[in-house]
Amino acid sequence: MIVCIAEKPSVARDIAEVLGAHSRREGYIEGNGYQVTWTFGHLCTLKEPHEYTPSWKSWSLSSLPMIPPRFGIKLIGNPSYEKQFKVIEGLMQKADEIINCGDAGQEGELIQRWVMQKAGARCPVKRLWISSLTEEAIREGFAKLKDQADFQPLYEAGLSRAIGDWLLGMNATRLYTIKYGQNKQVLSIGRVQTPTLALIVNRQLEIQNFTPRQYWELKTVYRDTTFSALIKKSEEELMLEEDKKKEAAKKTKKEEENRGIDPIESLEQGESLVEQIRNSPFAITDVSKKEGREYPPRLFDLTSLQVECNKKFGYSADETLKIIQSLYEKKVATYPRVDTTFLSDDIYPKCPGILKGLRDYEVLTTPLVGKTLTKSKKVFDNTKVTDHHAIIPTGQHPQNLTDMERRVFDMIARRFIAVFYPDCKVATTTVLGEVESIEFRVTGKQILEPGWRVVFGVPENVNAPEDKDEKEGEEESVLPAFVEGESGPHLPILNEKWTQPPRPYTEATLLRAMETAGKLVDNDELRDALKENGIGRPSTRAAIIETLFKRNYIRKERKNLIATPTGVELIQIIHEELLKSAELTGIWEKKLREIERKTYDARQFLEELKQMVSEVVMSVLSDNSNRRITIQEAVSVQQEEKGKKETKKRERKPAAPKKKAAPTKPAAEPVAGNATPSSAAPSSSTPAGTPATPNAQAANTVDPLVGQTCPLCGKGTIIKGKAAYGCSEWRSGCTYRKTFE
């Protein structure tokens, strides 16, 4: 008998249907020589500290660093999980062959490998590797099953990540909680979580410490067109530009001359210039027109989809991830947890069929019918695709989508259609003028052929949808016809301005900063290069942001992410750059990717991490100051904006402050890094934990059931109501309910 193990019941049902297995059993589906079973995401996790060494049960500085000689796994303490695991174990013990049908990614590989190890599987194992859940994709995947050994590096990278998160999270959280915390409140430290918080805190401090500087802009209106005076760039600006050129590795044809007047820093200086030019004629000195092309926007990877949804609809990163995961499970979109915006060449022959399946977009797809579709290297590039390609429609007609799902699908569909449309042809006109030796300039832009822009229904003089935020206030319009040498009267204007601080992070800009390890870049090619050193993975960044909310390290003001006093104090008290530097954490992420590609040794990575943890412990223990962090209560929901769905979902009513702590152990101990419920560290509430006092239990903000995958639908997560636990997918019909004991 061949046993197939999927990550969710819904995926198992899809696979069983294709394989011809129709007999439902307790915990699996059987038929046609197959037994198709499932997990509920993570069934296993790394053992808790005291399960390696009993003395590690109690939190004390003397037990740090905790570095087990060998890491082990255990079943997560949950009756539903234990029941399903017994089914899996029984099937695997008798199996002739196992097919790992887990999510085709690093975490999916780790989830199933741990289950197979725990179940003591000994038979040969094959791997199903697919990018969508359509019947065609599943059949094709089963026809091309791969050997499990081919994915050993992927498993080693996932295991190294989990162990690294355990080592840093367990040790640093205990270390900082005991050393700097008050009233036994947990100070959660994470390999990815803490550098992400540091990005927000550093930006916030930059804004708070910003001193606005007054300056003036000299403009003049000639023939109903506003020209701006050229301003010399400061040495700092020139150096910044030079650095950007080096980073982008782009050679400029000719070094631009630093022309223009000195910056206007006083009203007197500005008024003097106005008087100097007021009565002299304005002369046009140069008119240049350059025709160019604008390429269609790139296809979506997970991060760019989350960024765009946050900008356009205000969806949080977590909401977008859940929506695209649902679209994937409804078979209308391809695998979502991807970090590439390219397609592999083998997708190209399938594209006409996918376009044909987009029946709601026939107005846009009809012009492409019967033509050879464009095959641009900016879309199809095997060298830019590893395990999965960019997120695209599958070609199946979407049905029964929610409003939120429909919006996200629409964005994905239009991006996909647009890449087969012609480039947008534009003409950029630059006009230079002069009066009394002071140079002025104006730039106009005209769309000659809209090309792909018609897919988005964008007016001809408006920037592309993804450019709106970046180019706000800089929209270029069509200019009148100017002739070199013409001159005439003009009206000078002096505008008072103030320098502006950097903007607070939104989820969109924070995701971009995480992707590039804190470096702010707009160029797509440069962003691709920096992705190698990004912090976190596309699939876990949303959970990291959610964790910062839950820990009350950040809160939301409209779209802006604001660090709480606790979050600011935590980052300020951490002196070890290794814990809070996005750049250094990005280097660790790069090494994990290299392990996946077999260019870095997993054992060496873990040895380096153990050394780092030991150094951090020694550094903090040698701090003789009496610093303490004040734990602040979370901002109540009522103070947030009313009526915004994402705000209601995001903010949670805070638990009451602790009145009395457990004798040996604080409320909960989170694992660093990915911080998802499935990889959360062992808490004091688990059976093996130290019993807490009644008061401590009441005040404990971490419930072991909350956040775990729903055992009934396998799609939602457990939430806590007034009288019972339920499922977050209750609106979609899930009936899971468990009354409080």
Image (cartoon, rainbow, N blue to C red):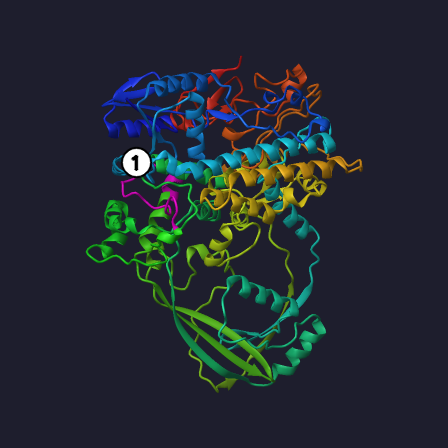
Residue under circle 1?
A: 145
Instruction: Give how far across and how far down residue 537 sits, in percent.
Output: 49, 42
Most common secondary structure along the magenta stretch? loop
Residues drawn in magenta: 385-408
Question: In this rendering, would 662 be left or right of 33?
Answer: right
User: Would you identify the image quadrant in which residue 35 lies?
Assistant: top left
- Magenta stretch contains residue 395: yes
Q: Nearer the viewer, residue 4 or 478?
A: 4
Instruction: Give how far across and how far down residue 98 sits, in percent.
Output: 33, 27
Local crowd size for mark 1, using a 10 Å CA cut-off: few (<14), some (14–19), many (≥20): some
Question: In this rendering, would 51 be left or right of 565?
Answer: left
Count up the numbered dots. 1
Q: Name, please, the residue furthest toward the top.
A: 741
Question: Is any atom of residue 253 visible in this view?
Answer: yes
Question: Is any atom of residue 402 visible in this view?
Answer: no
- Magenta stretch contains residue 715: no
User: Would you identify the image quadrant in which residue 367 lies?
Assistant: bottom left
Q: Name, please, the residue furthest toward the bottom.
A: 485
The quadrant in which the N terminus is found is top left
Instruction: Give how far across and how far down residue 525 sits, in percent.
Output: 46, 58
Vertical side of 717 occupied by 622: above or below: below
User: Would you identify the image quadrant in which residue 29 lies?
Assistant: top left
Instruction: Give how far across and how far down residue 645 sits, in percent.
Output: 49, 37
Residue type at numbered disc 1: Leu
Q: Secondary structure at mark 1?
A: loop
Vertical side of 422 occupied by 391: above or below: above
Q: Nearer the viewer, residue 140 or 498?
A: 140
Residue placed at 70% from the left, 71% from the top?
Answer: 267
